[in-house]
């Protein structure tokens, strides 16, 4: 049977209380103090984790706000281009809407997106998709179906 008294994890001195339940909170290096230190450590860890999560959420919020500003600017530019084209080429809004639908349907779905199209690389003939600028196999620059494809 181990008769050694427990030692303080902070200073290494022997803990003199005979029973953990006899220890008062004021006794230095008592088992209760060790538990308190352990719990404070856990609280500090939790606070650190919460601070990290808050900073990460703030960074995501800033990126989202930046993306929203970019989309607004792109929408503004698209509207300006369309209005110039409509005036010069005398297209109608209906023709524009029909063209948007036709492009949307090129990937077989009407989802409001251009989508990804699978095609063969003109050099190595391996399958590639329309999101890539170059072939993943041979590296040759791939032709783009859409100038504005993202
Ligand atoms: Zn290739």
Image: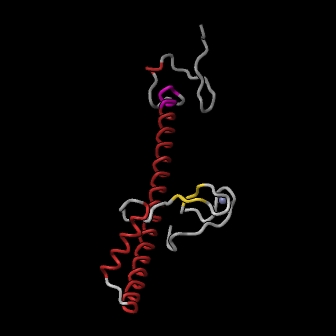
What secondary structure is the magenta-colored segment mainly?
A: helix
Location of residue 115 with respect to 74 vertically, above or below: above
Ligand 1 - quadrant of the structure image: bottom right
Instruction: Specify the color scheme.
Output: secondary structure
Residue in the foreground of this view, choosing between 3 and 93 = 93
Residue lying at 32% horizontally and 84% vertically, measured from the top left: 92
The magenta span reads 30-35
Q: In front: 105, or 49?
A: 105
Please identify the residue farthest to the left as the structure is shown: 94
Instruction: Report the residue that reaches farthest toward the right.
Output: 138
Instruction: Count the marks.
Output: 0
On the rendered image, what quadrant is the N terminus found in? top right
Q: Is residue 52 above or below residue 35?
A: below
Magenta span has 9?
no
In percent of width and height, residue 128 lies at 58, 57
Q: Provide residue 114's location: percent of width, then percent of height.
A: 44, 65
- Residue 34: within the magenta? yes
Foreground residue among 122 and 12: 122
Q: Residue furthest top?
A: 1
**Residue 14: image location, x then y, percent:** 60, 23
Q: Which residue appears at 55% of the width and 21% of the height?
A: 16
Vertically, is 55 above or below 89? above
Residue at (46, 65) in percent of width and height:
62
Could you say where residue 106 lies in the image, as x and y percent from the top left? 43, 64
Image position of 12 (left or right of 42): right
């Amino acid at each position: 049977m181990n008769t050694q008294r427990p030692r303080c994890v902070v200073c290494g001195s022997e803990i003199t209380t005979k029973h953990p339940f006899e220890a008062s909170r004021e006794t230095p290096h008592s088992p209760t103090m060790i538990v308190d230190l352990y719990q404070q450590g856990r609280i500090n860890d939790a606070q650190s984790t919460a601070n990290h999560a808050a900073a990460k959420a703030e960074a995501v919020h800033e990126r989202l706000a930046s993306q929203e500003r970019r989309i607004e600017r792109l929408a503004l530019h698209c509207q300006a281009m369309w209005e110039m084209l409509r005036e010069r080429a005398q297209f109608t809004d209906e023709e524009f809407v029909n063209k948007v639908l036709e492009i949307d349907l090129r990937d077989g779905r009407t989802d409001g997106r251009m989508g990804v199209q699978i095609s063969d690389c003109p050099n190595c003939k391996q399958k590639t998709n329309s999101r890539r600028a170059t072939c993943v196999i041979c590296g040759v620059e791939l032709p783009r179906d859409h100038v504005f494809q993202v």
